[in-house]
Amino acid sequence: MSKKKVLILGGGAVGAIVANKVSREMRREIARGELDITILDKNATSYNQGGYTFIPFGLLTPEDITRPRRSLISPRVNCVFGRDGEVTMVNLDQREVKTVGGETYAYDYLLIATGCQCDLDALPGLKEDFNTFYTNLDDTLKLKERLENMPKGRIVILTTGMPVPCPGAPGKFAALLDDYVKSVKGWKPGTDSTITFLWPLPLVGPPEYNKLFTRNLKERGIEDRREFKPTEINPSSRQIVSAAGEIIDYDLLITIPVHKPAQAMVDSGITDEKGWLPSDKYSLRYNNKGAESYREVYVVGDTGPVDILKTGIGAHYQASVTAQNLINDLHGTPVTVPYRGETGCPFVQSSYTTSQRGKAHIATWTYDNPLKPFKPTELGWFFYRMYYYIYWDTAIKGLM
């Protein structure tokens, strides 16, 4: 029997979960030399990106949200990091992947989990005044320092457009920021500071999520502007200009830029008309206008099409489903476990301060079952905070 090769592009949460689940189930085949699983990634460090939201307020540390990738992935899995793991080209017809280091990897089954990246060129002036918690740990720590050293002023949270991964994160950040400036900085709302939330769509999340979120901003006194379409940022005058001609002044601008897929996917010519990797919404197999010849290719996580919501919860469910389908493929079982759109987003009503205990809720829904009414609780806040510590030993190991 010839050795089967499973190649995983991306060693983040999705890649690690799939690799760990498949290698655990197929450990005998790996031991007999019948199966080879390889992960490619340019970075040897894993970041729990959801933790970036907490870093600026001292609620998590860099050590809390980082781990060596090799320590998270089964020793049965081959890991290639650095130049030899940084993908430059994917050839679906030839079933091979090329890297910056000049290596070529062949595969029988391919999982593309290369995520996405912010597009700083999409909005003129953004590069000249870019502060965010969305991109990487360094940018998040810089924002933390700016907030610590800021005496007072007008803070604007701007989401420039869609799609963005974890679209609920800007709203969570707004609530945490408001608690921080009031409880830690001691600012008086309306006198020492104002917070403005600029959002490109009518709703933030599903209707039930949006209802509670809108109420929360109103009760906090945060200015809430929807369907705001920025066209330019003027760093010298500290102003945001909208398509409608509105001008928003700021002292500190915190931006969540529109995102795009990894450049290697675009260069490979495998993206759709919107620039993302197409896949069937139920099987998560690569499906560019019904190309059945690529049944062996899966697209999972933030690199997928725009009609599959990009959230951490969704990526976890997608990884579990894809792992089982890869196991079925390797066993020759003609059964596809469907991904039914399981996704969600934590809702943060308040954080734990000297005057309140904190309230949150993990809101979830599927393609066919919309989000039901929910109530944030103190237990929800503590569970949400606890998750960032158990994530490394359970979720990313494919144990939950």
Image: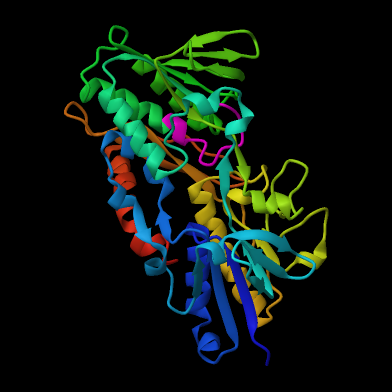
In the image, is 313 to the left or to the right of 58?
Answer: right
Q: How is the image coloured?
A: rainbow
In the image, is 341 to the left or to the right of 75?
Answer: right
Residue furthest out toward the front = 102
* Residue 360 visible somewhere in the drawing: no
Image quarter in which the C terminus is found: bottom left
Rendered position, 176 above or below 250:
below
Rendered position, 88 above or below 352:
below
* Residue 326 visible somewhere in the drawing: yes
Residue 170, horizontal then vertical, whole percent: 46, 31
Q: Which residues are magenta?
A: 159-171
Residue 85: image quadrant is: bottom right
Residue 34, horizontal then vertical, whole percent: 60, 88
Residue 359: image quadrant is: top left
Residue furthest out toward the left = 354
Does 164 lie within the magenta span?
A: yes
Residue 274, horizontal then vertical, whole percent: 73, 40
In this view, the residue in front, 109 or 360, is: 109
In the image, is 24 to the left or to the right of 202?
Answer: left
Does 200 lie within the magenta span?
A: no
Residue found 48% across the figure and 35% down from its top: 168
- The majority secondary structure of the magenta stretch comes to loop
In this view, the residue in front, 268 or 13, is: 268
Image quarter in which the N terminus is found: bottom right
Residue 10: image quadrant is: bottom right
Rendered position, 269 above or below 227:
below
Residue found 58% across the figure and 70% down from its top: 324
In this view, the residue in front, 113 or 202, is: 113
Residue 335, horizontal then vertical, whole percent: 68, 72
Number of numbered discs on residues: 0
